[in-house]
């Protein structure tokens, strides 16, 4: 279909910058994109017939990574960082 | 080695956005809204079972008026449980280690129970200030004592939660620092400290759940007296 309506995974690398220019960067647009992203993650990994720990564990691991990156400025000053 | 052992409790922020905001909103992501299907996915089934369990547990001793508090008490329980347990993951931030947050939760809810009691049944609520069967001479002293204990409830609720979680996190950090430092020097002692660390982590998981439960239970008890 037309470039602006294709989801991100179906956009070729060369067309990436044109695809980004067609994106809606208003607050509503960003929230809508976040909602869609969450819904697709939920539908693919959690809302399945025989789900289990992996769906939620990926979420928690992502949360740990996010917290690490949020605190990085603080961690890099730990004196024994080389040995942690 | 950290600059100071209390650094882990500083409210971290990146580019002006505080992490506490994300830590408070993340539990909402872990509890997807129930769909209107009869059989949902396993996560939702487990969560709904758990919600039913705690709601029944909290609402059984309350009368019909108290059931209006079902939503706020059970959602508070779920929030505190999730926040406390998420804080045990590496590098995460626990909002309930901040006294400001716990007092902000405890004070309005306690005040709501107190004002409900004073508005709907003032003499019964004030009557709680004097236990039955006290000797006549002790009445003035006991009223003062009971008033103090009443007024200190929100402080106790907030500080209890803060102190328990802060102490646990601090202990984990101290013992893990000891384990890391002892590893090249005395591996046997380091192994011992590692076993202590494992036991402590199990304790912390239990404390996280118990403290959330105690907070909400005490609030429901204060509600029972006043509703």
Image (cartoon, coloured by chain):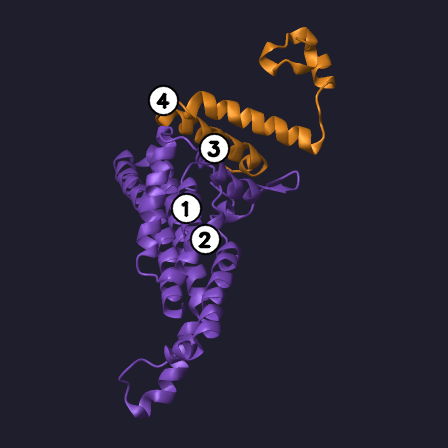
Cβ–Cβ under 8 Å for marks 3 and 4? no
Upstream in the sequence, badge 1 or badge 2? Answer: 2
**Mark 4, residues whose alpha carbon is within 10 Å: few (<14), some, or many (≥20)?**
few
Residue B120, image x, y percentages: 46, 72
Q: For numbered disc 4, what is the local secondary structure?
A: loop
> Tag 2, which chain?
B
Mark 1 or mark 2: which is in front? 2
- The residue indicated by pointer 4 is A49
Residue shown at the point (52%, 58%) measured from the top left: B104
Residue B79, image x, y percentages: 44, 46
Taking B212 as reference, is B107 left or right? right
Question: Which one is nearer the viewer's eye here, B227 or B36?
Answer: B36
- The residue indicated by pointer 3 is A64
- The residue indicated by pointer 1 is B78
Q: For numbered disc 2, what is the local secondary structure?
A: helix
Cβ–Cβ under 8 Å for marks 3 and 2? no
Farthest-out residue, bottom: B137
Question: Which one is nearer the viewer's eye here, B65 or B92?
Answer: B65
Residue B213, image x, y percentages: 35, 53
Taking A71 as reference, is A58 left or right? left
- The residue indicated by pointer 2 is B72
**Mark 2, residues whose alpha carbon is within 10 Å: few (<14), some, or many (≥20)?**
few
Residue shown at the point (34%, 55%) measured from the top left: B58
Between the C-alphas of marks 3 and 4, the distance is 27 Å
Q: Are marks 3 and 4 on the same chain?
A: yes
Q: For numbered disc 3, what is the local secondary structure?
A: helix
Between the C-alphas of marks 3 and 2, the distance is 28 Å
Taking B153 as reference, is B11 left or right? right
Between the C-alphas of marks 4 and 2, the distance is 31 Å
Mark 1 or mark 3: which is in front? 1
């Amino acid at each position: 279909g037309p470039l602006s309506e294709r989801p991100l995974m179906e956009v070729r690398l060369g067309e990436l910058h044109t695809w980004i220019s067609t994106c809606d960067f208003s607050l509503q647009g960003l929230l809508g994109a976040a909602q869609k992203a969450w819904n697709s993650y939920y539908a693919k990994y959690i809302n399945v017939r025989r789900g289990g720990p992996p769906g939620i564990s990926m979420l928690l691991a992502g949360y740990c990574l996010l917290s690490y990156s949020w605190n990085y400025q603080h961690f890099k000053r730990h004196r024994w960082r080389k040995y942690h | 080695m950290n600059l100071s052992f209390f650094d882990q409790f500083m409210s971290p922020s990146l580019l002006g956005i505080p992490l506490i905001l994300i830590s408070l909103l993340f539990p909402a992501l872990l509890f997807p809204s129930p769909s209107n299907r009869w059989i949902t996915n396993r996560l939702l089934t487990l969560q709904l079972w758990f919600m039913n369990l705690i709601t029944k547990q909290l609402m059984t001793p309350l009368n019909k008026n108290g059931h209006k508090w079902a939503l706020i008490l059970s959602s508070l329980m779920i929030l505190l449980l999730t926040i406390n347990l998420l804080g045990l993951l590496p590098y995460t931030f626990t909002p309930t280690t901040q006294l400001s947050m716990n007092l902000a939760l405890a004070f309005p809810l306690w005040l709501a129970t107190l004002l409900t009691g004073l508005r709907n049944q003032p003499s019964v609520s004030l009557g709680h200030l004097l236990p039955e069967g006290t000797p006549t001479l002790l009445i003035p002293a006991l009223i003062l004592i009971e008033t103090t204990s009443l007024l200190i409830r929100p402080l106790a609720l907030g500080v209890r939660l803060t102190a328990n979680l802060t102490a646990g996190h601090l202990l984990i950090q101290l013992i893990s620092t000891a384990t890391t430092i002892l590893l090249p020097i005395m591996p046997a002692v380091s192994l011992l400290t590692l076993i202590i660390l494992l036991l402590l982590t199990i304790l912390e998981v239990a404390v996280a759940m118990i403290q959330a439960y105690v907070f909400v239970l005490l609030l429901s008890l204060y509600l029972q007296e006043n509703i």
